[in-house]
């Protein structure tokens, strides 16, 4: 299970909010406010865990959010 995730916000291909490191539970809570689809949220977390990152796109196909796995040493 992921402990922390780095999240950045994008608009029209440009980063508009620098990455923030958040707890996985904070990211899950934020996503639950946007969608009640727990399966989709689980899919996002699985993608981040397996591949290291997950992009969420807007209706035009531009990246809107980037979630990245944070590795701890």
Image: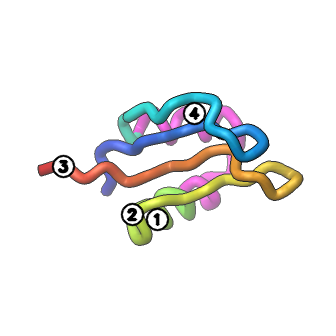
Reading the image, the residue beneath label 4 is: 30
Q: CA distance from mark 4 to mark 3?
A: 23 Å
Quadrant of residue 36 in the image?
top right
2 and 4 marks in contact (CB < 8 Å)? no
Does dot 2 land on a helix, a strand or a loop? helix
Does dot 4 land on a helix, a strand or a loop? helix
- Which comes before the other along the chain, label 2 or label 4? 4
User: Would you say 21 lies left or right of 54 here?
Assistant: left
Residue 44's spot in the image, x, y percent?
55, 58
Label 1: few (<14), some or many (≥20) within 10 Å?
some
Residue 63's spot in the image, x, y percent?
70, 51
Q: CA distance from mark 1 to mark 2?
A: 5 Å
- Which comes before the other along the chain, label 2 or label 3? 2
The image's mark for residue 46 is 1
The image's mark for residue 56 is none
**Residue positioned 33% across, 52% down in the render:** 2
The furthest residue to the front: 14
What secondary structure prevails in the magenta region?
helix
User: Would you say 71 lies left or right of 14 here?
Assistant: left
1 and 2 marks in contact (CB < 8 Å)? yes
* Residues rendered magenta in the picture: 25-41
Does dot 1 land on a helix, a strand or a loop? helix
Reading the image, the residue beneath label 2 is: 49
Reading the image, the residue beneath label 3 is: 72
């Amino acid at each position: 299970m992921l402990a922390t995730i780095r999240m950045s916000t994008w608009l029209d291909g440009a980063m508009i909010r620098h990455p923030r490191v958040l707890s996985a539970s904070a990211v899950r809570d934020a996503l639950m406010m946007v969608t009640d689809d727990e399966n989709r949220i689980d899919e996002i977390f699985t993608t981040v865990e397996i591949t290291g990152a997950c992009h969420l796109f807007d209706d035009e196909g531009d990246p809107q959010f980037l979630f990245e796995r944070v590795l701890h040493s």
